[in-house]
Amino acid sequence: MNNVSSPSATALTAAAARAAHLVVDQAPFLFADPLAHRLLGEQAETLLGYHRAHGSHPVLAGARTAVVTRARYTEDRLAESARRGVAQYVILGAGLDTSAYRPDTPRGTRVFEVDRPATQEWKRLRLAEEGITAPGTVTFVPADLERDSLPGRLAAHGFDPSAPAFVAWLGVSMYLTREAVGATLDAVRAFAPGTELVMDYLLPEELRDADGQAYAEAVMGMAARNGEPWLSFFAPADLTSLLGRHGLEVVEHVGQRDCVAPELWERSDALRPSRLACLARARVAAPS
């Protein structure tokens, strides 16, 4: 794999957080991704080693909390969408997401993984090396969301634009300008009415709690030094307005605490919900 580019640092750290949750934290688990560890490759022990050695550190515990709560909420909404008959699942910036390879993904759902070609090549090599077979319901859609037409790229890979889809857009919006966020929302608006989007976003400083602000202060500079600066922050009302201008109706905004059942926060480990990242759930409305 020496001639293949690695995925972004955020893709690796998100997968490491999902993997570490099952190793460092205590049951009941908020989310279970048994494949994340296997996709980390030669970096697995280094990345998981940080969590094993310093699992209660606020930054590492905060990262695990953010990643597993957003995954839990999103996959619960995916299951609800499938029960309504939606059979297309689009993952924007899929990175090392493993939902298509786990048995809990709703049966019959066609999964379209959208990401940069280099990241997809790396991931496909890791899947092959681990003997993880991509089911026939999975399609890799190489695309640069800042340059390519998302509806066009999806249609070229078998996506049915006349049928609704469930769209997950996680761990991406904070690294884009507001203009780039709006361009992606315009692309989603072109999907069939009834399409649902779940995206996460970062709150501005004045809306964060103490834990959320401490995490931001610890991580924001590091992200910038790694070439992935945080660029966009939204108050819920602000994002609701932006979504509306791009043809999407907000269903709800959800914080980390409300992503899982309340009793799951009665924990003996270091996971605690904070107010830094939130999730927005929105739908493509039928033409009036």
Image: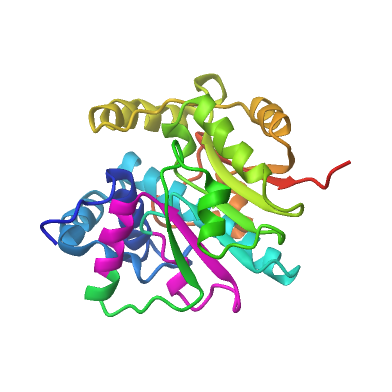
Q: Which residue is painted at 46% across and 46% down in the image?
A: 66
For residue 23, say whether it is visible.
yes
Image coloring type: rainbow
Q: Is residue 24 left or right of residue 180?
A: left
For residue 233, say whether it is visible.
no
- Residue 4 in the image: state x and y as whole percent: 18, 56
* Quarter of the figure with residue 37: bottom left
Q: Residue furthest left?
A: 2
Q: Give the residues in magenta.
A: 97-126
Query: Height in image: 129 above or below 14?
Result: below
Q: Which residue is painted at 32% across and 33% down in the image?
A: 228
- Residue 35 in the image: state x and y as whole percent: 35, 70
- Residue 255 in the image: state x and y as whole percent: 59, 42
* Viewport quadrant of the C terminus: top right
Query: Height in image: 154 above or below 179?
Result: below
Query: Height in image: 91 above or below 38?
Result: above
